[in-house]
Amino acid sequence: MLELARVFKGYNTDKDLKFIAFGSEERGLLGSRYYVDQLTQAERANIEAVFNPDMVATNYAEAKNLYVMTVDGGKNIVTESTMAAGARLGNSDILPGKFGSSDHVPFHDAGIPSALFIWMGIDSWDPLVYHIEKVYHTPEDTIEDNISTERMQSALEIIGAGLFDVVRKEVPGLKR
């Protein structure tokens, strides 16, 4: 999130960008739910999209793909922009999915297009069985032992390119 904020700081867009880290996700989405609950209707209407990266640098071998997950498994501006970005980048890591347990949920519940980005593996024989890093939130959950710079780079490229599509200024096309 911080790297995307650093990169986008220099971009000229027509839209306001907010990079927010929420606390207490595992305790019931307390931070994100509080944030959304405090928004006025006008502020909610002004949010075009929410890109929620979570565990996007895990090196856990069973987490084979980067998923863009919505609460209902449906498409929205976030899923469409990042799936298109993955295709343009020639990056087949990203797949769509359904997942209703992260900070994207309160935004979805408020009618705001949102999606979770997370590396995981899903068993083809049972889509309810998924694999995420086993040591997260334990003393073994260290940067030295559990971070994949390659996966982080892949996630940043896809999420960043998708976000750019949503916030970029419309400019006249170049004649070739």
Image (cartoon, helix red, strand yellow):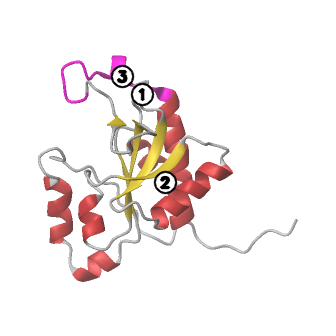
x, y percent for residue 56: 41, 38
Q: In the rendered view, does 94 fall on the left or right side of 134?
A: right
The residue range painted magenta reads 136-149
User: How far is mark 1 from mark 2, CA to CA?
Assistant: 32 Å
Q: Which residue is mark 2?
A: 8
Q: How many marks?
A: 3
Kindly report which numbered mark, 3 or 2, lies closer to the viewer in this rendering: 3
The answer to whether 140 is drawn above or below residue 56 in the figure is above
Residue 29, percent from left and from top = 17, 53
Q: Nearer the viewer, residue 34 or 95?
A: 95
Marking on residue 146: 3
Residue 146 among those drawn in magenta: yes
For label 2, the SS is helix
Identify the element where label 3 is drawn.
helix
Can residue 11 be seen here? The reply is no
Residue drawn at (45%, 26%) of the image: 148
Assess disc 2: are there few (<14), some (14-19) or many (≥20) residues with their C-alpha within 10 Å of its C-alpha. Answer: some
In the image, which is nearer the foreground, mark 1 or mark 3? Answer: 1
Residue at (45% x, 70% y) in the render: 15
Q: Is residue 76 above or below residue 158?
A: below
Residue holding disc 1: 62
Q: Circle 1 sits in a helix, a strand or a loop, which is it?
A: loop
User: Which amino acid, by three-letter code, is at mark 2?
Assistant: Phe
Residue 166 is one of the magenta-drawn residues: no
3D distance between C-alphas at marks 3 and 2: 27 Å
